[in-house]
Every structure is written in C-alpha cells, then in structure tokens.
Amino acid sequence: MSNYICVGGQWGDEGKGRIVDILSEKSDIVVRYQGGNNAGHTLVVDGVRTVLHLIPSGILHKHIVCVIAPGVVIDPEVLLQEIDTLNARGVVTDPSRLLLSPTAHVIFPFHKKLDLAREKARGSEKIGTTGRGIGPAYEEKVGRRGIRLYELFDKKHLAQRIRDACVFVNTILNALDAETFSGHEIEEMIERYSQHAQRLKPFVCDIHGFLQRARTERKRILFEGAQGALLDVDHGTYPYVTSSNCVAGHAAAGSGDGFARHAKVVLVTKCYATRVGSGPFPTELHDDVGENLRQKGAEFGATTGRPRRCGWLDMKALKYACEIHGADLLAITKLDILAEMPTIKVCIGYEIDGVAVGHFPWNPEDLARVRPVYREFAGFGPLASNMNNRSDLPKEAQEYLSFIEDYCGVHIALVSTGPQRGAELSEF
Ligand code: IMP
C-alpha cells in the first residue's frame, strides 16, 4: 500500500493537479496541508477544464474524501464559491466528501488589502504575489494574532476578533498610505463572515482523529502540495517566495499526520521551466523560443491569468529541489510542448564571472548573477497518440528523459504527453 506526497519541483505550476488526479485513482483520501487559494490546479476531464484553488484536485473522483488540513489558509468566500461550482457541475461536494480543519487560519478582506498595499509600497521590489492575502494571513498566524476557522462560529467572539484585527490592520494601512476599513465596512464583514461560518460549519471536523482512524483502517492517503520547492519560504528564492513551506517534509507538519513522513514523495516538474511573479530565474528566455513555449504551453497563470516567464529546464535547481523534498520518484509533465523544437537546451551548471558555482545560490543576488552553462539535445518530432511506455517515445526524447533521471538520481515514474486524462506514460 502506498501513500504519496505530490509536490512541485520548480516555482509552482508544474502540473501537480494532473498528477494528483492520476494518483487519486489509487488513493482514498487527498489532503491539502499548506498554501491557500494562491494555488491553481487545472484538470481537463472529458474535455471539460476545471481549475481548483483550494479544494484538493481529488474531489473529481467520486470515491475520494478531501481534507483541508490545519496548515492551509482558507478564504471562506473562495471556498464556498468552489463548493457551489462543483455541486452545480454534479461533483458532490458535501460534508461526506470535504472535511475542514477547525484550526486552519482564515483569510479576511483585510489580508488581501494588506497584500496589495504592501506590494504597491515595494514598487519595483515587489514580490509579484497573487494578491490573495496569503502572506498577511500567515504573518498573523505566526504572530499569534490570526483567526482560526472555529472562531467564526461564535458571532460575538468573531465580532470582537475582527474589530481588534482591524485596529491593527488600519494602523498599517495608514502607514502604507492605503485606504483603511471604515466602521461600516467592519460591521458588514462581521455579518458576512458569520453567514459564511454557518454554511461551512457542517464541513468542520476533528481532522487529526479522522486521519488517525484512516491510518488504522489502512486507507491510502495522498498529500497534495501546492506551489513548489523554489517558492518555499525557507529553502526557495527568498524573499521571492510564498509564505509557507512547500517542501514534502511539511506534509507531516501541515496535516498533523506525523506518519506522512513514510509516504513516497513524487516530485513533479515540467520538462522546461516557468515562473510567475518576480525573482531570479537563471534560464529565462526573452526571445522567440520563450514566447513559443508560453503560447504552445498555454503558460498563463491559472489563478491570476498573468503570463508566465518561460525558460529551459534548470538541472541545478531541479537537483536541489529533489534534495530538499527528498524525492523518491519524478513525474515529468508537458513533454509534448517540446516536440518539434529544432534543439532543446538544459542548464547543467552555473558560473559567476567565469567561475563555476558549486551549490544552488542561497541569496537572490547571486542567483540573479549566475550564467547558465547549457548542454544541447537534439529535438524530436511530434509525439504519437498510441504510446504505452517510454520506449515508444522518439529516441531523442528518451535520451532527454534519461539525462534528467541520471542527473537527479531519481527514477521517472510518469511522463505526461498531453493535457487530457490518459495522455501519459505512467507506472502508477
Ligand atoms: P503569494 O503566495 O500570493 O504570496 O505569492 C508569492 C509568490 O509565489 C509570487 O511570485 C507568486 O506568483 C508565487 N505563487 C504563489 N502561488 C503560486 C502557484 O500556485 N503557482 C505559481 N506561483 C505561485
């Protein structure tokens, strides 16, 4: 029996939703344990495209129970909207299929306003956040001022917590020269959020107890990571990162299921690289090749619609990601996007001022200065639609994949060759 942790090996947007969808067939429970609705997991099932930001992608499988664990930050308005959309599409999303942790922290409108005001104040130094209030919500959590989901159920208590939070937030907004929350807006927020609370209450349960029972019943658990290794707040390209730990090790901490550490880690990476938002990106392409990747790969943010920055695969960064995640298996996505390119480049090392850099740079200044050293691979033609395993791929594509595998020292268990379910060569 295998439990899995599915994580991103780059700067997010690696196609994790797709892999979670595949692994869900072999799971009973899917758990999200970090991040919030900054994520955007896109799935194409029977030609219908679904983008989920908060609810685990496993919801599209009827047998799966989805869990939003304590480490996630929840925007109730986004969550209710997703619940309504899924139900309207006939995907049953009720308390028998979706469980929420009472101790997950809640995103309020003031977190979003703070997020946007801080970004504006940073000017050219902006992080390029998704503007969803993720950073400020995690800050409040770590600052021990945050409001947890269960606190929404007692209206009097909630009212006091929101009023207190707004005093604090208004001081910061004032200092940032941004519009503050009026008394009327605050009272309206209290009313709205206590209504949301009534709708969400039936979904809330003891997640710790649920997961431990699931363990004793030998249920198969899949932990769904959001964002990617290089956006991790401790190990990514700080400060151009998100505000949570995206590494696989955090599946145990964010879910409260310590046994998650025994799960197999599946690292998902595209066969080229993308990044949304600011921050160093050594292999970024500013030419027609980059534009071609963006158009052919539909590289536009699932959450914000922003065009993604595109470039060649960076093995130095990928190997680092394998190490900090503790990757057991690799899943390579979007091989079809590289098809018909005359040549394919891969970064195999970095230099600064002509001197080789041994480690993955830990500060953004050095990472911004590195010059990638490339190895060139022959391109390959269009991919056939009737392939069953890797040996059916064009020889040049097989060589490219074997190189990735050897460099990382991690076996490739899946290669996706198209956006729709079934277009993959999978050992799962
Ligand atoms: P935040 O998470 O909204 O604070 O954004 C911080 C950084 O992480 C920005 O560069 C975002 O573009 C990036 N980011 C956050 N979530 C995702 C994601 O799911 N995919 C790709 N990038 C993300």
Image (cartoon, rainbow, N blue to C red):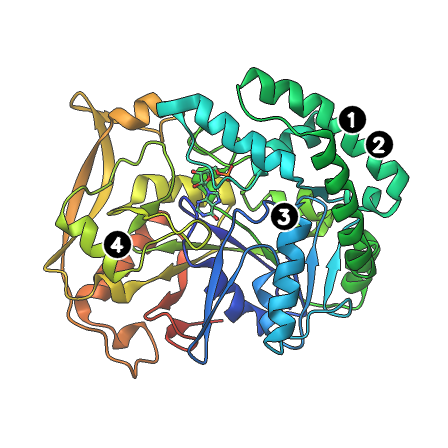
Q: How busy is the neighbourhood of tag 3: few (under 14 within 10 Å), some, or many (20 plus)?
A: many
Of tags 3 and 1, the one toward the viewer is 1
Q: Earlier in the sequence, mark 4 or mark 2?
A: 2
The spot of residue 40 in percent (x, y) is 49, 55
Of tags 4 and 2, the one toward the viewer is 2
Q: How busy is the neighbourhood of tag 4: few (under 14 within 10 Å), some, or many (20 plus)?
A: some
Foreground residue among 34 and 260: 34
Which residue: 46% across, 37% down?
Answer: 129
Q: Is residue 222 left or right of residue 209?
A: left
Amino acid beneath label 4? Arg
Spatial CA distance of label 2 from label 3 is 33 Å
Spatial CA distance of label 4 from label 1 is 45 Å
Which residue: 26% across, 67% down?
Answer: 336
Of tags 4 and 1, the one toward the viewer is 1
Spatial CA distance of label 3 from label 1 is 32 Å
Q: Secondary structure at mark 1?
A: helix
Which residue: 24% across, 32% down?
Answer: 350
Residue on which the image places disc 1? 164
Confirm or reject: label 4 Cβ below 8 Å from ligand 1. no
Q: Which mark is residue 160?
A: 2
Can I make out residue 152 in this image? Answer: yes
Q: Secondary structure at mark 4?
A: helix
Q: Which mark is residue 294?
A: 4
